[in-house]
Image (spheres, coloured by chain):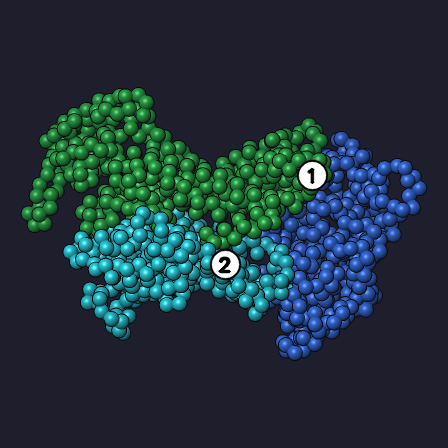
Chain colours: A blue, B cyan, C green
Amino acid sequence: MNTVAEDTVVLEVKGLTTHFHLDEGVLKAVDGVDLRLKKGRTLGIVGESGCGKSVTSQALLRIVPKPGRIQGEIWLRRSKGDKQGEVVDIVKLPDKKKEIREIRGGEIAMIFQEPMKAFSPIHTVGDQIMEAILLHRTEDRKEAYRLAVDTLVEVGMSNPEQRMNEYPHQLSGGMRQRAMIAMAVSCQPAILIADEPTTALDVTVQAQVLDLIDGLKQSTGTSVVFITHDLGVIAEISDEVAVMYLGKVVEYTDVDTLFHGAIHPYTKALLASIPSVSRRERKTRLDAIEGRVPVPMNLPQGCGFYSRCPKAQDGVCNLADIPLVEVRKGHSVRCLLVDA
Amino acid sequence: MLTYISYRLLQMIPLLFVISVIVFVIIQLPPGDFLTTYVEQLRLSGSDVDASTIIQLKAQYGLDLPLYGQYWVWIKNIILHGDLGMSIQWNLPVSEVIGDRLLLTLLISVISLILIWIIAIPIGIYSATHQYSWLDYAFSFVGFIGLAIPGFLIALLLVYFVFNLTGLSVTGLFSPEYEGAPWSWGKLLDLLPHMIVPVIIVGLSGTAALIRITRGMMLDELSKQYVITARAKGVSERRLLFKYPVRLAIHPLVSTIGWTIPALISGEAIISIVLNLPTTGPILLKALMVQDMYLAGSFLLILSVLTVFGTLLSDILLAVVDPRIRFGGTRS
Amino acid sequence: MIRKVIVKKSRTWLRLDRSKTVSSPEHTQDLRQGFEFASQWRLMWWKFRKHKLAMIAVPVLLLLYLSAIFCDFLSPTLPTSRFADYKNAPPQGIHFYDKESGFSLRPFVYGMKMEMNKETFRRQFTTDKSKKYPLHLFVKGDPYSFLGLFPTTTHLIGTGNPDAPFFLMGTDSLGRDLLTRILYGARISLSFGIVGVLLTLALGLLLGGLSGYFGGFVDVVIQRLIDLLICIPTIPLWMALAAALPQDWTSVQLYFGMIIIFSAINWTDLARVVRGKMLSLREEDFTLAARLGGASNLRIIRKHMLPSFSSYIIVIATMAIPSTILGETALSFLGLGMQAPAVSWGVLLQDAQNLQTVAHEPWLLWPAAFIVVSVLMFNFVGDGLRDAADPYK
């Protein structure tokens, strides 16, 4: 797979877990996730709120809030610095040391859901973008300023020079998200993690932001991990998709197969719950998934979807943890009731 | 910025007016006016007051006028002539009685305030970043005690224990040889070691409160999204801490300075009585006891006016450091 | 109304999945098996129980208040009884063992002898081991009326001998038993906290509520009033107002006069919190929903807003009790509050103002210990309540 540049795997996650040891027990937010991100491709992670997709993205940068503990392997192919080309395990890097900080922002950058909260309210937008540039690209403040303005132009910000001196509360929601994206891409990272970047935006602005991220990906060859609960966004932007439920990947496939050949009952249920304009039987009600996502603490053995699954079989699904099985090349499913 | 300040200054005028009315009412609360008390006191001490002096004093303080007229004369004397009235107890103009004492009260309060900030903020930051560590618990416990036990009790206990252990008396602000002496370098140097105990006691509860507030604010800020953003950019932990959460946590504290100063002055009033300091506390108490109301009222007025200006200063300071207020943005 | 909340399997579920809708009092959900109901108050209790210091403080406070209520029965004598032979006597110890008679199950106290110290010319007391006074329960002593209702002479504990000294905390310069006076003083000092806070609460709720609910002109006036009161340093203002109370007032008049002064100064904090809470609740979706549902203003306040912040009010009220107790103590200590025939902890501490007296008769500081303990305990309880106030957190 190393022969063709396009197929180079830049990030590989194996058996990633993130557990929160609380007074009440162990909360398994991420419980064994395997992912593979190829150069220049977009991996979509989709799931309901509380399925662990955001924690997964934070775990990739090791910025999970306390008392979260990360285990497993996160192999990153370094794209910059002395160790360029080497493959390192982010989980094993020493905490609070230089190498992990070089990776954060420099090689893997993140776009957050709510730009209003993600920016410090008392520092100018320029200051916050330049901070990243000064850390990863140049130590010269003038140069950094120029690079920051360039990036703002790149993300389509009007009056970039003026925006540099403005505070987050002075920008509109869409502008803030553009600034956020500028901050993330300002250091030309090899991997861009977008954690629900469009959720807090208007639909029209959503489309612009999606276009922007897609355009940046095309022009720079950045790989993108795109996290969302919106299947429509997934259809638009992803190459491959991981469907998450209760901290586990339940189905992993390319985007076409997801929409036309999904196998896992949960994925099917998710797809059935999308409202559609072209839906023929307009009279029928939308298929909602029964119940709600349980809290991943003290869970019973077996399939996590057991309590809500329409096909669940007592004595089959609730006995032991279900393995993720590759049913076809590039299509894995975590369900016993599927013929391999 | 200038419009903001001038707006705030304009706002102060009605406030100061109402405060002066309240103080005036308090002065008038005890039965009789100060002149009768004054004449009575002079008579008791054997010296008679001739009628012309009485008439002159009556005219000077407008005591024949109705209440609002008396208020007008009182406030006019203060604003135009800086004349706060007479102290019957000292038989001196009020301004002469309080001058030095007010200065010492302010000195103790301001030094306490500075110490509070220097001590409490780092401890608060440490406690928040090392939540549930044993030092955090230790600081919390000391803070709890400092908050719960009022200064005058601590002063009382301290005086007792120090005397019991060393035989020293920690009361007063000056050694006997400097007590009535005019200000000199020697007197100033003598003052410094005497100030340690009052400053510590006056500042204790404020420190405890500020540690608690800082810790709470920091814990709040540390869990905010922008901290994670900064971390995701690769900013080192130390730099991140001081650039973002510390600054954001300190901002609201700046606006509390205006309230801290009156609290300190309030606390100082009682502590100085216990420690027998030559500040405003004991003299205010004595003035209230013997109903030397111009003296007591002047204290109240001056302390309130100082507080109003303190609040103004801290608001301006906050506007200087916080762009959200400077640019009239919403606070989220 | 009980706020119903669904707890599945364990309450931890709630703590983690706290959403806006759950905090609405009108929130209801379908019930299924395996779900369990818990009222808001029960959840608060669960949370409160975890605060160890608060759980220690509650029984201590109960004990303090009970002894204040039954102080006449608990105390060995009356607060005004003077023992002319035992002025400034130090505290006595209770003994079970004596060299001559050995161990006895019935506790006893030794007698006291007064001597003149030849160097300092001060009167000093020494233990007189030749005299032993056994202690008895329910002894006859000075007559009083129990709770002000039933005349009796029975005291909980004592020697039964009117001439025998029994001063567990020593006596003051007039030969009055300090323990008795502290127990009686608790009545004024501890009740002052509660009564003072109740009046403050009434004022704060009324003015803060008016301010928050009506807004506009009412709000502006009340807010300016609060700004004004904050600007005047509290303690000097207390002192000035307390000094203006007529000197010929009785203790009861003074007590209520001081309560009025405290509430008139202290309602501002509470009013601000109430107003802020009202303002934010007015914007909440569930209030809007109730309004759209046709609920009247009064009903919205009563059924939707009050339950949402009653817990906060309880917390703030609890936190205000210690400072109110301290206020009375401080003023009485300075001689501006309760006056001599009345006994409060502050009045008792007045005797300890002088360094000389404290140095020679340190037991006069005992009231300070009681003040510190009760204030600390109230702070602990307040802390625990604050943690518990938002059980969904």
User: What percent of the width, then of the height, locates residue C231?
Assistant: 45, 56
Instruction: Tell me which amino acid carries mark 2.
Output: Pro
User: C244 or A81, which is in the foreground?
Assistant: C244
User: What percent of the width, then of the height, locates residue A33?
Assistant: 71, 50
Residue highlighted by disc 2: B14
- The label number, if any, that marks residue C291 in the structure image: 1
Q: Residue lying farthest left?
A: C118
Residue C281 visible to the viewer: yes
- Occupied quadrant, residue B89: bottom left
SS for dot 1: helix
Please report, as a chain letter, where disc 2 is located: B
User: What percent of the width, then of the height, locates residue C79?
Assistant: 24, 33
Q: Residue lying farthest right?
A: A280
Instruction: Tell me which amino acid carries mark 1.
Output: Arg
**Left or right position of B111 against C95:** right
User: B293 or B58, which is in the foreground?
Assistant: B58
**Left or right position of B60 against A254:** left
Which residue shows up at 18% across the image and 57% down it? B48
Quadrant of image for the C terminus of chain B: bottom right
Quadrant of image for the N terminus of chain B: bottom right
Indicate whether B36 appears above or below B1. Answer: above
Residue A295 visible to the viewer: no
SS for dot 2: helix
**Left or right position of A220 against B221:** right
